[in-house]
Image (spheres, rainbow, N blue to C red):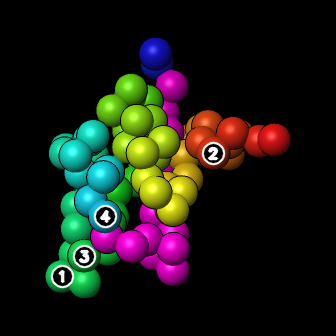
Amino acid sequence: MGDRWHVEVDRSVCIGSAQCLHHAPSGFRLDSARQSHPADPDTDASEQILEAAESCPVEAIVITLVGSGEPVFPPEE
């Protein structure tokens, strides 16, 4: 793909379902409170990270393009 993504997890929304870990085990970590964190906030675009964001039951994962800040997920309406 070549794109670089900035990945954020809104911890006020995260419920610790760990779906992100299921889809992208190298992309996310859970802390002691079972809150998700991106393993590397700025990462190469990947299908696994996108699937993790799409699978989050509370849409706590936000992905933007590094540099422009253009939204990748969730898509703009």
- Gap between marks 1 and 3 measured at Cα: 5 Å
The residue that mark 2 highlights is 74
Seen at 51% across and 62% down, the residue is 58
SS state under label 3: loop
The residue under the point 81% across, 41% down is: 77
Q: Residues within 10 Å of mark 4 (few under 14, many from 20)?
A: some
N-terminal of the pair, mark 3 or mark 2, is 3
| Boundaries of the magenta span | 3-16
Which residue is nearer to you in this view: 42 or 53?
Answer: 53
Image label count:
4
Mark carried by residue 32: 1
For the point 60% across and 42% down, the residue is: 73
Q: Nearer the viewer, mark 4 or mark 1?
A: 4
Q: Are marks 2 and 1 in contact (CB under 8 Å)?
A: no
Which numbered dot is residue 18? none
Q: Is residue 72 left or right of residue 13?
A: right
Relative image position of residue 43 (x, y in whole percent):
38, 40
Q: Disc 1 on helix, strand or loop?
A: loop
Q: Amino acid at mark 4?
A: Ser
Q: Is residue 1 magenta?
A: no
